[in-house]
Image (cartoon, rainbow, N blue to C red):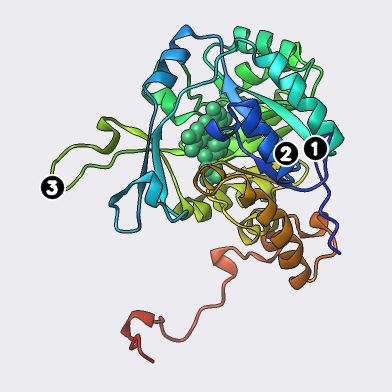
């Protein structure tokens, strides 16, 4: 049997499959369902201090796009659609008491609840983090929300100096493990990861979702009626690129992978790229928390097939095999695979 246990800095997980912060973890029922599905940790929906965050939840909307780009009714979803959305934040009212209750179930199951803050200002984030840390195993500070480009209730931090500022402000207020979640769209995710680490983050989660825009070709109406944030299976190679590059730059920095995982095989891909645990949101929203049980079950089999007895042996193994362009031997002739017959 594969040993699925892993660590994110000081946090020990029974397995690397995590429910990411999303509307699937915005209620006690949703969090408990993810715990019962066997997740190693559940990141609760984000909160922050901004009153505008509450309004943002009231204007939230969620569109699914199929492979052809056509919008799909949620009742007819297949589970692999791209999710384009405008998301909000949970209310702080009664939130910590709810996290404390779910924390008890998490402890019984050998799992963890991680509290999440999607930042507006750093000082209030630090205050919330300190209170939250009384009832959760760790705090995740999301400084990369794509909605920060569209809304005032949250902020997207894309420069190393500001990453340092947010991270060190929250770090100074917090004894618990701190995960800093980085944006997808930044000058250099590598520099942001180093800045977060240098300012006291125990781990870095990467990469957040991208901003998206999708007009209907017939009506000219943008889906959602606005810009939004987008994610789907196509994002996985991009996420794995930044995770693997960050791993290659600093193997000691604990990485949590997110954006694009839907299966045990995808979780394995994240691990092989250098992540020590993996957060899933869209798959849980589209297919339900059972997707987490499937990931835990299939991950063991996938890793065993790859010859790994332990999750920890797989971490970064593909990065060790990746060569730079300069080290790829040149052929006598350039390849032209597009000239082959698809039927061959
Ligand atoms: C509807 C929705 C709401 C989300 N809300 C949050 C949030 O409140 N805080 C946060 O840090 N990330 C949030 N995310 C991002 C997810 O946690 C996750 O990192 C991202 O969706 C990429 O993973 P995925 O491909 O498994 O969806 C949200 C994602 C979705 C789809």
Q: Position of residue 168 (x, y in %)?
A: 69, 17
Q: Label 3: how many residues lie within 10 Å, few (<14), some (14-19) or many (20+)?
A: few
Q: Label 1: how many residues lie within 10 Å, few (<14), some (14-19) or many (20+)?
A: many
In the foreground, 258 or 77: 77
- Circle 3 is placed at which residue position? 218
Task: Tell which circle, 3 or 2, labels the residue nearer the N-terminal end.
Answer: 2
Disc on res. 324:
none
Q: Position of residue 203 (x, y in %)?
A: 72, 34
Q: What residue is rendered at 31% in x and 32% in y? A: 227
Q: Are marks 1 and 2 in contact (CB under 8 Å)?
A: yes
Q: Position of residue 62 (x, y in %)?
A: 39, 36
Disc on res. 35:
2
Count of numbered marks: 3
- Circle 1 is placed at which residue position? 111
Q: What residue is rendered at 85% in x and 64% in y? A: 309
Residue 143 to residue 267: above or below: above
Task: Tell which circle, 1 or 2, labels the residue nearer the N-terminal end.
Answer: 2
- Measured in 3D between alpha carbons, the distance from the residue under mark 3 to the one under mark 1, in whole angstroms, is 48 Å
Secondary structure under the numbered disc 1 in the rendered image: loop
- Measured in 3D between alpha carbons, the distance from the residue under mark 3 to the one under mark 2, in whole angstroms, is 43 Å
Q: Are marks 3 and 1 in contact (CB under 8 Å)?
A: no
Q: Is any part of residue 259 visible from this angle?
A: no
- Say which quadrant the N terminus sits in: bottom right
- The quarter of the picture where residue 118 lies is top right
Asked if ligand 1 lies within 8 A of label 1, the reply is no
- Say which quadrant the C terminus sits in: bottom left
């Amino acid at each position: 049997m594969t040993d699925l246990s892993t660590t994110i800095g000081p946090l020990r997980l029974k397995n690397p499959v995590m429910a990411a912060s999303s509307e699937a973890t915005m209620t006690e029922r949703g969090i408990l369902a993810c715990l019962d599905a066997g997740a190693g940790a559940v990141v609760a929906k984000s909160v922050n201090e901004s009153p505008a965050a509450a309004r943002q939840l009231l204007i939230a909307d969620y569109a699914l796009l199929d492979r052809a780009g056509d919008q799909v009714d949620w009742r007819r979803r297949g589970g692999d659609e791209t999710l384009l959305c405008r998301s909000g934040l949970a209310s702080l009212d009664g939130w910590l008491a709810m996290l404390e209750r779910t924390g008890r179930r998490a402890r019984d199951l050998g799992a963890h609840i991680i509290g999440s803050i999607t930042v507006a200002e750093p000082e209030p984030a630090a205050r919330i983090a300190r209170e939250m840390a009384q009832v959760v195993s760790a705090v995740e500070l999301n400084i990369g929300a794509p909605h920060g480009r569209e809304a005032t209730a949250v902020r997207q931090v894309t420069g190393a100096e500001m990453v340092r500022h947010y991270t060190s402000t929250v770090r100074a207020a917090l004894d618990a493990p701190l995960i800093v979640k980085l944006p997808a769209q930044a000058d250099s995710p590598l520099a942001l990861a180093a800045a977060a680490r240098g300012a006291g983050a125990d781990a870095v989660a990467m990469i957040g979702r991208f901003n998206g825009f999708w007009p209907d070709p017939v009506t000219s109406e943008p889906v959602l009626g606005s810009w939004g944030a987008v994610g789907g299976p196509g994002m996985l190679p991009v996420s794995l690129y930044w995770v693997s590059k960050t791993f290659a730059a600093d193997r000691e920095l604990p990485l949590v992978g997110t954006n694009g995982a839907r299966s045990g095989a995808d979780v394995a891909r994240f691990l092989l790229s250098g992540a020590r645990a993996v957060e899933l949101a869209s798959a849980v929203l589209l297919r339900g928390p059972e997707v987490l049980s499937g990931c835990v079950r299939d991950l063991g089999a996938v890793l065993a097939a790859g010859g790994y007895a332990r999750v920890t042996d797989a971490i970064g193994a593909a990065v060790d095999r990746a060569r730079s362009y300069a080290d790829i031997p040149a052929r006598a002739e350039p390849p032209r695979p597009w000239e082959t017959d698809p039927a061959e």
